[in-house]
Image (spheres, rainbow, N blue to C red):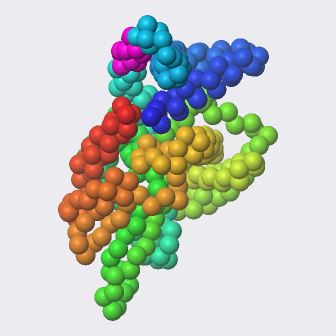
Amino acid sequence: MTSNRVITLIDRYTKIQRELEKPDVFRDPEKLKTLSKELHEIEPIYKTYQKLTSIEKQILETQNLLSTEKDQELISLAQNEIHRLEEEKTSLKKELEKHLSVEDPMDTKPVILEIRGAAGGEEADIFAHDLLRMYSRYAIKKAWEVENLDGNVVKIIGKGVFGHLKFESGVHRVQRVPITEAQGRVHTSTATVAVLPEVEETDIYIDPRDVTFDAFRASGHGGQNVNKVSTAVRLRHIPTGIVVECQTQRYQAQNRALAMEMLRSKLWAIQEEETQKEISQKRRLQVGRGMRAEKIRTYNVPQNRLTDHRIGTSWHNLEEIMEGNLDPIFDTLKEEEKKENMQ
């Protein structure tokens, strides 16, 4: 079985090849340089995968021939050929594993982290705030920079941010007694987490004609010009209906640039989700490109337990985890990802 990551990379390689055939790419030196560089990085995996696929096909053909052959001399030759091919297959698998062991370039990217309350009303919104606090405290421990973009949306900048947080996309569920519950009953609420890597303009092209732009007056903190000048921006991507807003910066141009950054990341996430659907409906890990509607984790407060449903593993120190002690969870998920990539 070929890992999800290999298939994703092969798919990306063929897409880049098609992109490089377009005349407009050659008129854009920066895009041409970026795509060529990415193609060069994936090429060893692509070539090794093609060789491995060819060897597996030869093995199958020889086995089929062997099953119908009566001549002992030809049977012996076929068996020797299968043995040789199996050795070559083993060697190519090791070579592919070596290529895959190299860090995914996307893992080094900053991320846009968006957390929203889902089912559960006010308690869901409180839980979303608790999750944002948890990730923010983790970021502080890692000496990362956290920049507020829009209330429940933050940008986190630092070494290997996406590589650490990429497993968090999905639905998080909490079971606890809400502060608004007078009878002491345990309620279940959910929040959605989206972890989006910072995406370059050359990675996701957005046709300006597909985006509507609105400027409005910012609210809240931000200086004397707040509520007086239309510095906040709202972008709507017509083909997908995605709407993003940004009002944290002092100038409209800065907010617009950040909003475009958020839009690119959201479009990238949709593209990656579709790729994952095509690859397999049975994967356990999301690798940061997860299904937004999939429940990935439960936080059981009365039992001080966190359970990750993708790998069936629980931790019994929920209080520490909510204070940002997430490394044991991330280390376990990384190990599972490694096993899948090497499968």
Q: Is residue 263 left or right of residue 97?
A: right
In the foreground, 119 or 11: 11
Circle count: 0
Give percent across and percent down for residue 177.
32, 81
Spot the residue most to the bottom.
183
Prevailing secondary structure class for the magenta stretch in the rendered image:
helix
Image quarter (top left, top right, bottom left or bottom right) of the N terminus: top left
Residue 342 in magenta?
Answer: no
Q: Give the range drawn in magenta.
A: 79-91
Image quadrant in which you'd find residue 343: top left
Can residue 296 be seen here? The reply is yes
Q: Which of 160 and 58 is in front in this view?
A: 58
Give residue 286's position: percent from left, percent from top: 45, 46
The image shows residue 234, relative to residue 307, as above or below, that is above
| Residue 295 placement: quadrant | bottom left
Question: Is 239 left, or right, of 135 in this rendering?
Answer: right
Q: Which residue is drawn at 36% across and 24% down?
A: 97
Look at the image and tell me whether residue 81 can be seen.
no
Point 53% across, 55% down: residue: 292
Residue drawn at point x = 37 percent, y = 38 percent: 340
Give the quarter of the image for residue 210: top right
Q: Which one is in front, 75 or 338?
A: 75
Q: Residue, x 59% and y 42% (percent of image)?
A: 278
Q: Position of residue 21 (x, y in %)?
A: 72, 17
Q: Is residue 168 above or below residue 184?
A: above
- Judge by depth and name the residue closer to the eye, 156 or 148: 156
Q: Is residue 87 magenta?
A: yes
Looking at the picture, how far across and down is residue 103, in whole percent? Answer: 37, 27
Above or below, comparing residue 17 to residue 247 in the picture:
above
